[in-house]
Amino acid sequence: MTSTDRPMMPPVRLPAEAELARAALAAPLFAHAAALARWAEAGTRVGAGGELYGEALAGAVERLGLTGEEAVEQAAEAWGIAVDAGLVEIEESGEEAMDDDDPADGVVTGGGAVGLLTQGSPGEVLDLWSAACEAVLADAALPDMSELADQLAEGGELDMDEFEWDLEGEADVLDGALTNLYLLTALESGGDPVPLPALAASLVVPEEMDEPTDEVLGEVSDVMMRLDEQFRLLEPIGLVDYQPVDESLVDEEGPLEDEGTDDEDISRYGLVRLTPLGMYAMRERMLDDGVHAPLVGELADKGADVLLDALPRYTDAAAQAEAEAWLTGTAPVDAARELLAAARGDDPRAPVRRLTCQQILSLAGPDAEPALRDVLDDRELGGLARVWLAEHGAADVPQPDEQMVLWLTVDTIAAQLGRPDLVELADLVEGLVAQHTGFFDRAWRIDHPAVGDVLEAMGRLHPDRAVAKQARKAAFKARSRS
C-alpha cells in the first residue's frame, strides 16, 4: 500500500509524552492495577486465569481501600488489568490443589514490568497503559450478558441458539464511535463533549436519510444504551470523559423515554469526549491498522515540498500551527526561497501548492522580502510575489501586466476547484466577472494548463445564464487552442 492509498485522518495535537504518561498513571483503574502489582508478593497463589481469590482477593480490596457492594468486583478488575498489562507475571504453580474447592493453578513471580512505571521512560509507561487499555476495550466489546444472566437466574434452560453472540459487531460499533469522536475532535480542534444521541445517530442513520424512521430511531436508542454501558467501562482507564445517561430516562423495559432533547435536557442523554490520552490511544490503533494519522508539528523537519502537499488537507487552525512550526528556526528568507521553489510546476497539483505557499508566506516576516523580489519576473510566482510585497508595505513594487494578473487569477481559481464547498468560490467568480469587462475574451488566451477547466467551472458556478454561456464558449476556445 502506497502512502497515497492509505486512509487519512485529520491531524491532531497531542500533549508531550511526559504529560500523557502522567495522565496514564493517574487513570483510576490503571493506578489501582499498579498499586496491586506493587502489593502482590511472589508466591501468591492465583486461579487458572491468573485471578485472585480467597484471602488474597480480600487483601486486594483492603489494599485499595474499597468499600461497598462492588468492592470485590473492582479489585478483581484492577488485578486483571495488572496481569493483562504485564505489571505482574504469573506462572503455573506445579503444585496440587489443597482441596477440591481450591482453584489455585498458578503463582505470582517476582517478575513483571511494574518497576517501569517509576523508572521507565514516558514511552514505556504509555506502552503499559496501552496494553491495559486494549484489555478494557476488549471487555467493553463483549456482548451484553444480561439476557444470559436473566435466563440463569430464572432457572430456565439456556438456549445458546437463541442467544446472539456478535463479538465482531460489538467491537465494530464501539470502534466506529471512538473513531467518530477522534474525527470530531480533530476537525473542530477542540474537546467539547458530544451528545450521546448524536454519536449514536452518526453510526446508525444513513447519510441520505433526511427524517429517520421509527425503526431507525429505535436502533439509535439501542446503540445509545449499549454505548452508555461501554463508555462507563472505558472512563476509569482514562480513555474518555463521560457523563452517563440519566437513569430516570430509562423505563423498566430499557428504551429511552421520549422527553425531548432540547439544550437543557441533552446532557441527561449522555455526553462523551475523548481525553488527550484517548486521542493518543486511538491514533496508535489507527497507525497499527495502516491509517495515516498525522500529528500537528511532525512536518517541522520535512522539506517544503512535503509541507505544501500536506497542508491543503489540514483544517485551517492545524495548517497554521504546522506552518508556524515549520518556519520556526529557519531564516525567513531561506524558508521563503525553499517554499517558492517547491511551489513551481505545471502539474495538476501545482495551483494548490502555490496557493498554500502564499498562505504560509503570509506568516513570514519582512525579512523574507529578498526571496519574493527574486521571483518578480517569474511567470508562475511573480503575481503572488507582488501580492505579498504589497501586503507587507514594500516600496517600489512593479505593477503587473494584464497577462500576469489573468494568469494569477486562473491559478487561484484552479487551486480551489477540488474543494467540496464551492460557495465562496462562486461568490469570487461572480465578483470577478462583474469587475472586469470582457474577462472571458481575454482569459481563454492565457497560457495556463488549467485555463479550460477554470473557465468551464466558472460557467457552472455563475448564476447568470448569459455569463455562464460566455464562460463555456471561452473554455471551448481555450481547449481548441491547445
Image: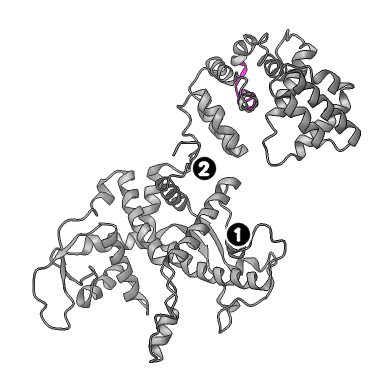
**Which span is picked out in magenta?**
355-366
Q: Residue at x 14, y 83 (%)?
A: 100
Label 1: how many Cα within 10 Å (few below 14, some 14–19, many 20+): some
Instruction: Look at the image and tell me in which quarter the N terminus lies.
Output: top left
Give the residue type at disc 1: Ser
2 and 1 marks in contact (CB < 8 Å) = no
| Residue 350 vs residue 450, the one in the foreground | 450
The label shown at residue 132 is none
| Residue 480 vs residue 263, the one in the foreground | 480
The label shown at residue 202 is 1
Q: Residue at x 23, y 53 (%)?
A: 113
The residue wearing badge 2 is 8
Determine which quarter of the picture holds residue 161.
Answer: bottom left
Q: Secondary structure at mark 2?
A: loop
- Residue 237 falls left or right of residue 381: left
- Residue 44 falls left or right of residue 77: left
**Count of labels in the image:** 2
Instruction: Look at the image and tell me in which quarter the C terminus lies.
Output: top right
Residue 65 is at least partly visible in this image: no
Is 365 one of the magenta-colored residues? Answer: yes
Q: Is residue 447 above or below residue 78?
A: above
Determine which quarter of the picture holds residue 37.
Answer: bottom left
Determine which quarter of the picture holds residue 345.
Answer: top right
**Dominant secondary structure of the residues highlighted in magenta in the image:** helix
In the orientation shown, which residue stands out farthest toward the front? 480
Give the residue type at disc 2: Met
Is 119 one of the magenta-colored residues? Answer: no
